[in-house]
């Protein structure tokens, strides 16, 4: 399958850790990471985007990053912008005034760009975490195009399982917010797979990272299609939940994709309302980012063998597609709790698929 030059062979977190374990004299990275030696602070400053788009930020990323960085002997200042670009800027100014040895930023509506400029002006290296930021020194994320490819394949397989020809199916595309650089990668990866199968979007409303808005947008699309839909490519579980609420209201059950392996997403997978969710084991991504941050805090020069199109060194972690038979793996890995999943109508499905 043809892949964008943005992402070459994705690496597992363990492989990323090995790549980062030593120092390199790679001239490509010298100009970017040399600022680390100038940083006097031993504090890792982190800004998370919100708590609404995904439960991962507060439930997984914050504790994982905090533990890894502090266990290595460094201080952390981890704050959440709560979906407010003004608050994002304020947090950044406060952190920078107190001193940062490295900044690890999850972008929110482009707010990370100006923060990255301020940090670099002070000689502080910047890691764009999970979402790309123009001007960042490094980018650490899951392989976003692969995420999209897995989602697209879930739709193609779901249609075929129902005996429907993908080339003639009515498929609605529900993407993420275009201000998030990852959203395009998810879309492109999914579109590549679905287009190869002959799928053309019947409707494609504006992308958002908001379950309620996604529900409204999908309902309008469904109405415009006369209530006919064969599948819905959805970029994440939160948006998928919004779409599913509309499908439920119209007594429809069709292939639906998603990502994040959230509690609600996994429940919908178990109930057969969502074909699959792309599982991104957050500790893998957090470890790769923490390893990188620790090296920068130590004044070392990490060696990274992949790059974005703009030349930014890129560490890509491999995602996994999860169907109902795979949910127990997510539970065993500690990314979900059976006690949270197996409630109400989902309890019987948990018993069927051995989730405990």
Image (tube, helix red, strand yellow):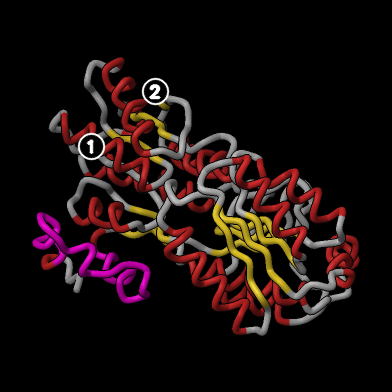
Q: Which residue is at a point 36% across and 29% down the rendered structure image? A: 172
Q: Position of residue 58 (x, y in %)?
A: 46, 61
- The number of numbered discs placed on residues in the rendered structure image is 2
The disc label shown at residue 245, or none: 1
Q: Position of residue 53 (x, y in %)?
A: 44, 46
Q: Secondary structure at mark 2?
A: strand
Q: Quadrant of the C terminus?
A: bottom left
Does the magenta segment cover residue 11?
Answer: no
Q: Which residues are magenta?
A: 325-350
Q: Secondary structure at mark 1?
A: helix
Q: Observer-nearest residue: 226 or 128?
A: 128
Q: Position of residue 251 (x, y in %)?
A: 13, 32
What whole-number distance in Å separates the C-alpha atoms at marks 1 and 2? Answer: 18 Å
Could you say which quadrant of the image residue 122 lies in?
bottom right
The residue carrying pointer 1 sits among few (fewer than 14), some (14 to 19) or many (20 or more) residues within 10 Å by Cα, namely some
Is residue 205 depicted above or below 244 in this figure? above
Does the magenta segment cover residue 327?
Answer: yes
The disc label shown at residue 146, or none: none
The main secondary structure of the magenta stretch is: helix
Compared across the picture, whether 75 is left or right of 349 comes to: right
Instruction: Please report whichever mark, 1 or 2, sits nearer to the chain's N-terminal start.
Output: 2
Whether residue 152 is visible here, answered yes or no, is yes
The residue indicated by pointer 2 is 203
Which tag is nearer the camera, tag 1 or tag 2? Answer: 1
């Amino acid at each position: 399958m043809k892949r964008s030059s943005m992402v070459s062979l994705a690496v597992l977190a363990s492989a990323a850790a090995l790549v980062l374990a030593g120092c390199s004299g790679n001239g490509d990275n010298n100009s970017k990471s040399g600022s680390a030696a100038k940083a006097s602070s031993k504090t890792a400053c982190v800004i998370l985007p919100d708590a609404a788009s995904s439960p991962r930020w507060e439930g997984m990323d914050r504790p994982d990053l905090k533990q890894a960085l502090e266990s290595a002997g460094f201080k952390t200042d981890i704050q959440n912008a709560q979906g407010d670009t003004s608050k994002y800027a304020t947090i950044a100014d406060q952190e920078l005034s107190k001193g940062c040895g490295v900044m690890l930023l999850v972008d929110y509506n482009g707010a990370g760009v100006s923060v990255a400029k301020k940090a670099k002006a002070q000689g502080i290296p910047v890691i764009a975490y999970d979402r790309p930021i123009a001007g960042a020194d490094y980018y650490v994320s899951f392989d976003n195009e692969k995420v999209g490819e897995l989602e697209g394949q879930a739709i193609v397989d779901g249609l075929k399982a129902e005996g429907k020809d993908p080339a003639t199916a009515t498929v609605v595309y529900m993407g993420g917010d275009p201000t998030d650089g990852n959203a395009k990668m998810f879309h492109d990866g999914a579109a590549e797979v679905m287009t190869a199968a002959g799928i053309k979007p019947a409707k494609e409303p504006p992308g958002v990272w908001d379950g309620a808005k996604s529900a409204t947008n999908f309902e309008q699309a469904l109405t415009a299609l006369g209530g006919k839909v064969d599948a819905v490519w959805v970029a994440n579980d939160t948006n998928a939940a919004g779409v599913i609420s509309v499908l439920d209201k119209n007594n429809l059950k069709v292939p639906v994709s998603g990502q994040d392996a959230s509690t609600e997403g996994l429940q919908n997978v178990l109930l057969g309302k969502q074909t699959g969710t792309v599982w991104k084991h957050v500790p893998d991504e957090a470890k790769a980012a923490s390893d990188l941050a620790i090296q920068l805090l130590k004044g070392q020069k990490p060696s990274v063998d992949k790059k974005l199109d703009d030349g930014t060194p890129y560490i890509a972690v491999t995602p996994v597609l999860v169907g109902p038979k795979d949910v127990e793996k997510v539970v065993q890995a500690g990314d979900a709790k059976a006690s949270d999943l197996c409630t109400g109508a989902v309890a019987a499905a948990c018993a069927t698929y051995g989730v405990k």
